Amino acid sequence: MNGSHGARGFTLIEAVVAASLLMFVGMGAVMLMSVSRDGAQLTRTQARQTNWLRHASMSVRDDLAQTTDSRLTIATLPDGNHSITFQRPTASVAGVATWGAYDASAASGRLRDDHFTRYTVTMGDNGRQLMRQTLDPSLVVVHEDVIAYGLASGSATPPGLRIVASGDLWQVTIGLAATTAQPGGSMTFDVALHN
């Protein structure tokens, strides 16, 4: 007790305060990493949805632009979505068109007389999906491709697939359902038929 000071360690209170601060910093880092991961996942999901909508709208627009009002049939599915069946000109001989559909199942892809194209909404493993189908003259599916996943029901706003006449144009809406894993989204566009 002569007043000399030796090397001192941390007091218990200092050690507890330091451990608490370290714990809060660690929790903040974990939360930041979690938010960053969730944000990256949401960005990937939104990019995937945007890609589906862009691909689906291009496919529908390109196909519908080849048909006429008289070759287009719209049906309402049980869930309220639309199903669109149509033909496009495949050839013209002496000014008379033959009608059919583009069949992507052929090795090089080809136009098939008397066939039909149909866009419809079906239920798959991941919910509603937009299908592009090639139908034979008896309306039996000979080929189909999934164009988009996660479509909304027909009663949703916006619906999964809807086509309505709007003056000289046809207005097409493709909508994706909002879930906890995806925010949803939609695309509405006009198509001028080949009339």
Image (cartoon, rainbow, N blue to C red):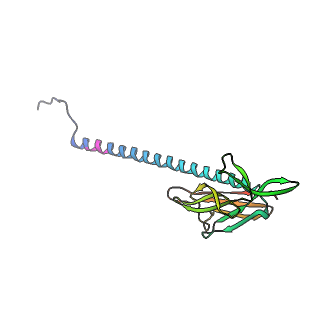
Is residue 159 shown left or right of residue 92?
A: left
Picture coordinates of residue 8, whole percent (x, y): 20, 33
Asked whether residue 13 is drawn in magenta, I would say no
124 to 77, vertically: above or below: above
Asked whether residue 17 is drawn in magenta, I would say yes
Picture coordinates of residue 62, whole percent (x, y): 73, 52
Say which quarter of the image contains residue 83. Answer: bottom right
Residue 78 seen in this snapshot = yes
Start and end of the magenta stretch?
A: 16-20
Residue 193 seen in this snapshot = no
Q: Assign the magenta stretch its main secondary structure.
A: helix
Say which quarter of the image contains residue 157. Answer: bottom right
Residue at position x 63%, y 66% in the image: 81
Picture coordinates of residue 95, whole percent (x, y): 88, 55
Q: Nearer the viewer, residue 153 or 135?
A: 135
Q: Nearer the viewer, residue 171 or 107?
A: 107
Residue at position x 59%, y 65% in the image: 153
- Residue furthest to the right in view is 94
Picture coordinates of residue 6, whole percent (x, y): 17, 29
Figure quadrant of the N terminus: top left
Is residue 166 shown left or right of residue 173?
A: right
177 to 58, vertically: above or below: below
Q: Which of 188 and 89 is in front in this view?
A: 89
